[in-house]
Image (spheres, rainbow, N blue to C red):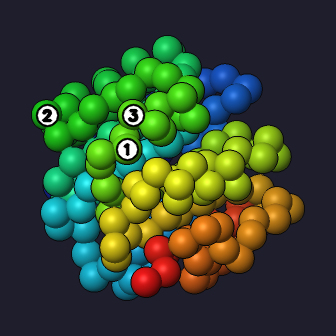
């Protein structure tokens, strides 16, 4: 897996190998970031939250493209170690914070923060995305023009809306579904 664009373009990221780790393939990340580029106009100055961070590839891609900061939440110690190595390798350690904690336990700690881009990429078929959307909405963690990108298995069904959050787009890539949510005004 490599960083696709930006200041760390082409750098190969370390991966934790295990049953529960499923990194987003390069071709899907490339499509995802192309969509985000067109919807957001760029990544400069964005504050990123990456829940269920895995290798950290999604947040690192955003940082490489100009995001100001990223908070990566991952409960597996081995994965958190890989995230830190990848951040060091790409020279983003000073812009990122790694939290080793369950995503749902970590969310209330962000109550005073607002994020412009939120990645939700939990293990598939475990119904983590819908409850995460509920908490993000309840805690008001998405900025006014922010976007949530939720990656699920293509057979998982997500709601059109959750509180103030409205699904604006959904794309299928084989067995992967990416859903995009905005905060309604």
Residue 3, image x, y percentages? 35, 51
Disc 1 element:
loop
Q: Residue at x 82, y 65 (%)?
A: 157
Dot 1: few (<14), some (14–19), or many (≥20) neighbours within 10 Å? few
Q: Quadrant of the C terminus?
A: bottom left
Q: Which one is closest to the eye, mark 1 or mark 2?
A: 1
Mark drawn on residue 146: none
Disc 3 element:
helix
* Residue 68 higher or lower than 75, as above or below: below
Q: Which one is closest to the eye, mark 2 or mark 3?
A: 3
Disc 2 element:
helix
Give the distance between the C-alpha atoms of the residues marked 3 and 1, in whole angstroms. Answer: 6 Å
Q: Residue 85 falls in which quadrant of the image?
A: top left
Dot 3: few (<14), some (14–19), or many (≥20) neighbours within 10 Å? few
Residue 94, image x, y percentages? 13, 34
Please state which of residues 119 and 25 is positioned toward the viewer in this rendering.
119
Residue under circle 2?
94
Q: Residue at x 17, y 67 (%)?
A: 44
Give the distance between the C-alpha atoms of the residues marked 1 and 2, in whole angstroms. Answer: 22 Å
Please report contact status of discs 2 and 3: CB closer than 8 Å, yes or no. Answer: no
Asked whether residue 80 is in view, the answer is yes
Please state which of residues 179 and 174 is positioned toward the viewer in this rendering.
179
Is 38 placed left or right of 24 in the picture? Answer: left
Q: Residue at x 17, y 54 (%)?
A: 68
Residue under circle 1?
111
Residue 23, image x, y percentages? 58, 43
Please report contact status of discs 3 and 1: CB closer than 8 Å, yes or no. Answer: yes
Give the distance between the C-alpha atoms of the residues marked 2 and 3, in whole angstroms. Answer: 20 Å
Residue under circle 3?
109
Dot 2: few (<14), some (14–19), or many (≥20) neighbours within 10 Å? few
Residue 59, image x, y percentages? 36, 48
């Amino acid at each position: 897996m490599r960083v696709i664009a930006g200041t760390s373009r082409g750098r190969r990221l370390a991966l934790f190998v295990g049953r529960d780790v499923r990194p987003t393939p390069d071709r899907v990340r490339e499509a995802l970031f192309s969509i985000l580029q067109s919807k957001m106009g760029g990544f400069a100055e964005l504050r990123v939250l990456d829940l269920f961070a895995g290798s950290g590839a999604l947040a690192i891609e955003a940082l490489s493209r100009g995001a100001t900061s990223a908070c990566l939440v991952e409960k597996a110690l081995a994965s958190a170690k890989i995230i830190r190595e990848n951040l060091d390798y790409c020279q983003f350690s000073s812009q990122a914070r790694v939290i080793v904690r369950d995503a749902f336990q970590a969310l209330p700690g962000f109550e005073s923060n607002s994020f412009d881009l939120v990645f939700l990429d939990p293990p598939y078929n475990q119904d983590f995305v819908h409850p995460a959307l509920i908490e993000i909405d309840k805690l008001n963690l998405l900025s006014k023009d922010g976007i949530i990108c939720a990656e699920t298995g293509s057979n998982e069904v997500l709601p059109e809306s959750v509180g103030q959050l409205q699904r604006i787009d959904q794309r299928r890539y084989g067995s992967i579904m990416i859903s995009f949510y905005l905060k309604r005004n």
